[in-house]
Amino acid sequence: MGELKITFLPEKRSIKVDKGTDLLTASIKAGIHIYNSCGGEGVCGRCKVIVKKGKFVTEHSGRISEKERKKGYVLACRTTPESDIEVLVPEESRLGDIEVLTGEARTKRLAGLYTPAEKIEEQPYKKEREIFKHGPLSTKLFLKLPAPTIDDNCADTDRLFREIRKGGDIQIMQMGLANIKKLPRLLRESDWQVTVTLGSRNRTTEVVLIEPGNTSTKNFGIALDIGTTTIVAYLVDLKSQKVLGAKASHNPQVDFGEDVITRIMYAQEQSGLEKLHHAVIDTINTLIYSLAKEQKLTLDDITAVTCAGNTTMTHLLLKIEPSYIRKEPYIPAVNFMPVIRAAEAGIKVNPRGLLACLPCIGSYVGGDIVSGVLASGMDNTDKLSLFIDLGTNGEVVIGNKEYFVACSTSAGPCFEGGGLSSGIRAMKGAIQSASIGKNKLKLGTIGKSAPKGICGSGIIDIMSEFLKHNIIDRSGKLKDNEICPVRERDGVKEIVLVDKKSSITGKDIKIDENDIKNVIHSKGAIYTGIEVLLKESGYKKSDIKHVFIAGGMGTAMNIRSAINIGLLPDLPEEKFEFLGNTSITGAKMCVLSSEAMEKTGSIANKMTYSDLSTNSSFMNNYSASLFLPHTDIESFPSVKRLL
Amino acid sequence: MGELKITFLPEKRSIKVDKGTDLLTASIKAGIHIYNSCGGEGVCGRCKVIVKKGKFVTEHSGRISEKERKKGYVLACRTTPESDIEVLVPEESRLGDIEVLTGEARTKRLAGLYTPAEKIEEQPYKKEREIFKHGPLSTKLFLKLPAPTIDDNCADTDRLFREIRKGGDIQIMQMGLANIKKLPRLLRESDWQVTVTLGSRNRTTEVVLIEPGNTSTKNFGIALDIGTTTIVAYLVDLKSQKVLGAKASHNPQVDFGEDVITRIMYAQEQSGLEKLHHAVIDTINTLIYSLAKEQKLTLDDITAVTCAGNTTMTHLLLKIEPSYIRKEPYIPAVNFMPVIRAAEAGIKVNPRGLLACLPCIGSYVGGDIVSGVLASGMDNTDKLSLFIDLGTNGEVVIGNKEYFVACSTSAGPCFEGGGLSSGIRAMKGAIQSASIGKNKLKLGTIGKSAPKGICGSGIIDIMSEFLKHNIIDRSGKLKDNEICPVRERDGVKEIVLVDKKSSITGKDIKIDENDIKNVIHSKGAIYTGIEVLLKESGYKKSDIKHVFIAGGMGTAMNIRSAINIGLLPDLPEEKFEFLGNTSITGAKMCVLSSEAMEKTGSIANKMTYSDLSTNSSFMNNYSASLFLPHTDIESFPSVKRLL
């Protein structure tokens, strides 16, 4: 097979590939991140590129309009070069530069009840400490052992254990053969002054590491949030409890499929699981390496890693076969991961450092949600709370300190900008807010930059404003109006928000009736999820005392708008609270406190997973929810007044 | 460097070695086992060989008499060939064919109080079961799991754990990543019918192994006694509790030094620890392999190994540096070994099978003694028992269910036939008994074979008879008499027991005053050890209700004779009981019962190690004991009457 040269524009990055390699596969090799949500099946139509030079064969796709075809648009996954070729990857097909929320949102503290996280820069753990005792996943203890004498002649390990136990009662203490072998010489060469690293491992205490002298001031941990789209890493000083740095990256598994289902399918292919695993591990290692470098630490200084991720992400991280997650009756291999050495998963920190994954609940409610519940503090009160994570799946949890019910609503990626004709993630240039005043639509973009597309909070605002001003009706149809002119393209009605001349993508930024339908389906799924969980637990909406909102959209979302379109229940605004990225907050709490980590176990144990896909009451309620705000307007009295 | 050919006679085994290699080193390479107790330092004089042909250089040694020199005797360790050479290894310099006690001695059962082991062939575990619940180190459980449904959708691991827990309460259950990875496919391919192997690991329960289908009837364990001289292995059916086979071998570490001290010194040399470790592991693997082969088992069928050995043997088994054991204040690296995978130590059974070593007490009281105490049952009664292990060190334990004190008397190898001019181990042809009747000495040999030398029980009988018939006086001097003529050689008085014409070694079998002195020192050390422990624990001899005797000498020893020479305290004979090899008995109990294994921990915890080498009362009492039976004849009233 001959080799062909593929050059990606505008960066002019070239790569040689075997003949027969499609452009999407080539782009992955070249490190160019192209959107695709179907795993290269030619279905999603996200991977549009423009061939500028060279011969190729391509498959016809309904996802590419006649106009686009004339401009040279093809689907990267369905196109194979026949000669050396130059390919332009347009802005809208790229995964944008990452500007994700690594931090937790600022939250007001609910007096005495619970103490969710605060912004990193403001001593994030200060408040949590009031609940969870500081006691990291791995603790360093400096010990001055008495030298043995004829009268005090216990074995080296017993001497070590005796000294460790002076610090407190330890039920089961373990030390592996590797450390026992090191011990005799190390103790004597260090004049009986050593630092031990103690790790919490499945309700036993392990002597993870023994070092000569006093290294107890240098002990660091990593907290990870492994999202389907984004990976966030915190470097935490386990002694001072400070977050020293935070970094984020795309989850490069996106190259193999945008959502968990396509990735699980990819995992079943030849060495698919291997590739997915390495993709995430390599990224984690890069993040950790650069965090450590910034703080002038070595990887050996890092002895503990905690990780919150959804069930599939956790399986892929540990290279555990995920295939039964997507097959009825949807069974994960494991919910409660054992604490292992991080090295076992391929994570490069101290070779004996530990990795603890937050427990999952079921196939579609994972450790990220348990982490969120932990971070919200909703398990510390007997008042009923509602927790909503507005990620790709839209997970919902209802409960209090007695029990929880949780579901995943499969809401789709609307609120992350996915599934919309002009949708983008919350990045620079994303339209994140909208308001209509004096018969004019005003748009706000992130970073006040030139507009690039619409993100989650933007579409919610736009639809709410359109509904209020009668630009869409309650079924989601666009109506002729004087504020935003409606036009029709290919038989679909649409409103152009930003003309292509003003948009930096060179294309109109618009909203069409299909977009609106998608949003209605998404918000309907989440709202119905809330309804079903309330019903299952015998509560009504008014019993909800607090609503916690987690997820990438963060504080940008307008609560009023979200209620107006029927995404959130019609409750007083002061009950709502944004928590930001609770997955990373919980992971951080767990690396700093074994008590918090244990709490995740008890949260997981008292949480019941409700599978909506097989729930008949979900099906009934769902169709009623496909209206703005809802078929039953009486359940949204404040919106009824407004309209 | 040139190569020289060395041929060992009479087997005519040849080996090529580099010039400069000594004959002892060459013999090890050739697989010829030559005695040596000093590790090749030219001190012990055990490695005598006769050069029959070829040139060599040798060092002068006082260990070789003028007569021997003329016959061509040299010390193998001090002799280096200068040409191709032929060397005869005489019978007395060889480690004899192994005929060690693999079995436990038959014992009478002490009604209701404790139930020591019985002979293998008679359901060895039957009686122990009355004390210890059957519950092997690794148990196999066949499980029929309910297949998951939408309503019963817990994760695979949770499903497995739930089913396991139906069998009983398990506090901490662990399963490693390797098994989790296997689980999803294995469960489904085996139609949810699997066999799990559960292991007891440091007070947690580990899912060691998961196999498809029902393999629960095939679960086997190995019990090991790793002695300084001999290694014994039992193959145990963990289900039926039967011992299926027993095999023994020399401990090939003998090649590097006969006692633990020389081996510890050898371990400090370049790759010495490595060599000692591999010597024992290779032998263990050979024993296990041949036991398994006999029973038509695969090594994978063996999932558990227990091991009782003295502290140094246990360190060498696990390749843990032993050097501080022999340096004041004599500190082992570890007394309580963690349960590890047998493969970690290099033992070839199921790769995930477990290895549990019985705990040690201190540098010179090890897991073999803890095993003996367990096997004796002396920890189940509030009556005072005395336990004596007549091995190389002569360990003594006194105590009851409340506490134990233990010491090692450094008695030397006399009672194993070492340190005597005609001493040999208890093997075919060894003189094991003696009596004087009608003014004639009658000797009994093992296997009624032609005599080869004197073993431990033989020397005790001979000295007792000599004392009774005034052939030696109470200080150990040989006296002219009419029964056994006394002669003098090289200024040392001696009695020839078997003329060289009747001996199969072609040398006189004799006893001289140096031999007698050695025995007196040995018996004195043990007796004084007993005295010191009694004193330390505030008891007197008459408080002792039972005396358990363990060790290679087994049942051959005559109690009356041992009292006569002052080795054993003067107590009624019915208080004495022979237990045989208690080290292997205890190891077997532990592989069959986790309760027994736990008991070893509590025995070890309540046992205090008394270091005689620094004990002033030992020094005082010891010199008083260097008389037959003792300087204080009043403490041996029955002997006083006899004399």
Image: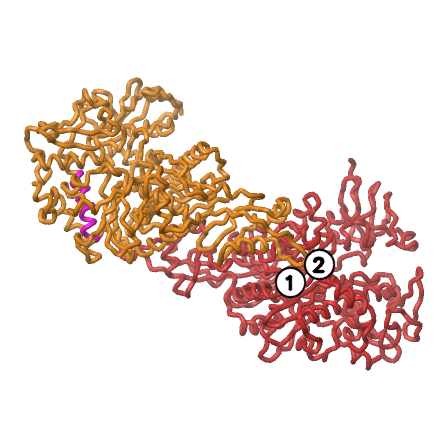
Chain colours: A orange, B red
Image position of B182 with respect to B538: above or below: above
Image position of A101 with respect to A489: above or below: below
| Residue positioned 16% across, 39% down in the render | A561
Going by the numbered disc 2, the residue's amino acid type is: Thr
The spot of residue A106 in percent (x, y) is: 29, 40
Going by the numbered disc 1, the residue's amino acid type is: Asp
| Residue positioned 42% across, 64% down in the render | B169
In the visual, does A597 lie left or right of A148? left
Between residue B386 and residue A476, name the one nearer to us.
B386
Res B211 seen here = yes
Q: Earlier in the sequence, mark 2 or mark 1?
A: 2
Q: Helix, strand or loop at disc 2? A: loop
What chain does badge 2 belong to? Answer: B
Depth check, mark 2 against mark 1: the one in front is 1
| Number of residue marks | 2
Question: Which numbered marker is on residue B368?
Answer: 1
* Distance CA(mark 2)–CA(mark 1): 13 Å
In the visual, does A151 lie left or right of B1? left
Image position of B502 with respect to A45: above or below: below
Question: Which numbered marker is on residue A622?
Answer: none
